[in-house]
Amino acid sequence: MASFGSAEQNRPMEPVTLTTERLLLRTVDRHDTDTVYAAAQDPDIQRWTTIPSPYLREHAEGFVEQAVPEGWANSSMFTFGLFLPSGELVGMLGITMRSLGTGEIGYWAAREHRRNGYIGEATRAAAHWSFTALALDRLEWRAEVGNTASRAVAEHTGFTIEGTLRAALNNNGVRRDCWLGSLLPSDLGLPSPAPYLPATP
C-alpha cells in the first residue's frame, strides 16, 4: 500500500506510545484481541462506525493482529488503544493517511467509559503528534450524520465542521451522508509544514 507522507514517513515506522493526563495511548497486539472483541460487541459502536456487524472474533483477530501492525509498518494507518493506568481499555483511535499531508482520524469509546472526556483527551494528543511527528498539515474527521457524540468530541477538540458530504460513507454496504471537519496545526498553535494561504472573502 502506498504511503502519502514525506520521505521520513515512507520508512517503516515503529509504533509509538503517547501519554496524557489520564491515559496511555499505545498500539494493540494479540494480547488485546479479546478485549477489543468484547468492547466492539456494543451495538452503538457497530451502528455508528464502519466495523463489521455482527462483529466476530475473527474480525478482532484480523484487526489487532494484522491490520494494526501492517498500518504502522507501511505508514498508512496509525492505531492506538486508549488505556487507563490500570490497563483497562477506554477506546480506540486511528489516523489513516488519505493524501499528501492529510490524515483522517477516527475513534470509538467503550460503553462504560463514555462522557468522561477520555476520547477528546486522546484526540488532542494524537492530533498534536500527527502534526509534529508525521508532519501533517490537515487532519480530517468524518462521521455519519446523526452521530452527535462523535461530533461533540470533534468540535470540543477544535475541529471546524466544514459541511455534509452526500453518500460519502459506506457503512456495511449502505451509502450514508457524513459530516466533515478539519483540524489544522494552527488550531493547536503549531506551525504548518506547508505554507497555507486561506481564501479571502
Image (spheres, rainbow, N blue to C red):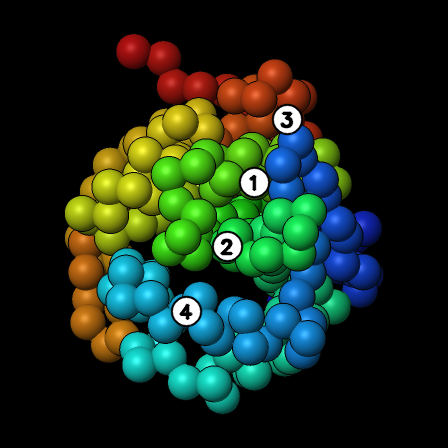
Q: Earlier in the sequence, mark 3 or mark 4?
A: 4
Q: Residue at x 63, y 42 (%)?
A: 23
- Give how far across and how far down residue 167 sits, in percent: 19, 59
| Left or right: where 159 falls relative to 78 | left
Q: Quadrant of the N terminus?
A: bottom right
Specify the amino acid type for callout 1. Ala
Q: Are marks 2 and 1 in contact (CB under 8 Å)?
A: yes
Report whether residue 3 is seen.
Answer: no
61 is higher (above) or lower (below) than 131: below
Q: Residue at x 54, y 34 (%)?
A: 121
Dot 3, how many residues are within 10 Å of its Cα: few (below 14), some (14-19), or many (20+)?
some
Judging by the rendered image, the residue that carries numbered circle 2 is 91
Answer above or below: position of 36 versus 128.
Answer: below
Residue at the disc numbered 4: 40
Distance between the alpha carbons at the discs numbered 4 and 1:
19 Å
Residue at mark 3? 192
Q: Which residue is mark 1?
A: 122
